[in-house]
Amino acid sequence: MSSIISYKGTRWFKCDFHLHTTASLCFQDREVTAKQWVDRAIAQGLNCVAVTDHNTGFGIDDIKAAAVGTDLTVFLVLKLLVMLQKFIC
């Protein structure tokens, strides 16, 4: 089994692992489409992104679909708010 490497040395990628979509309440511009979101990430020179919406994964499917056919790699990171209470018996 052989593989051909078309480059020599270390290969670097520009990534942002903390981005929100309109699925997060903190996202300011509610009119942004998934395609616009992906196009902006690519325009910023990003090779990979992580969608880190708060308490939901609803934004990921549209972003992943919009990224099909591009060189942008999309990861899902789900941030959940967990409230713990300590009970004393």
Image: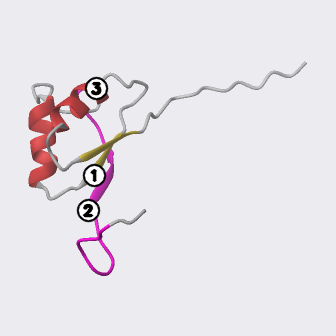
How packed mark 3 is, by other alpha carbons closer than 10 Å (few <14, some 14-19, many 20 or more), is: few
Q: Which residue type carries mark 2?
A: Lys
Question: Is 66 displayed left or right of 54 in the figure?
Answer: left
Rendering quarter of residue 38: top left
Write the start and end of the magenta stretch as one range: 4-25
Assign the C terminus to one quadrant of the image.
top right
Residue corresponding to mark 2 = 14
Assign the N terminus to one quadrant of the image.
bottom left
- Residues at marks 3 and 1, CA–CA distance in whole angstroms: 16 Å
How packed mark 2 is, by other alpha carbons closer than 10 Å (few <14, some 14-19, many 20 or more), is: few
Kindly give the residue lying farthest to the front in the view shown.
1
> Element at badge 2?
loop
Q: Which residue type carries mark 1?
A: Cys
Question: Is 29 displayed left or right of 49 in the figure?
Answer: left
Instruction: Find out whether the residues at labels 1 and 2 contact each other: C-beta distance under 8 Å.
Output: yes
Please tell me which residue lies in front, 28 or 69. 69
Residue 25 position within the rendered picture, expressed as x and y whole percent measured from the top left: 29, 26
- Residues at marks 2 and 3, CA–CA distance in whole angstroms: 22 Å
> Element at badge 3?
helix
> Element at badge 1?
strand
Q: Magenta residues: mostly which secondary structure?
A: loop
- Looking at the image, which residue is at 39% across and 24% down? 56
Which mark, residue 61? 3
Q: Which residue type carries mark 3?
A: Asp
Residue corresponding to mark 1 = 48
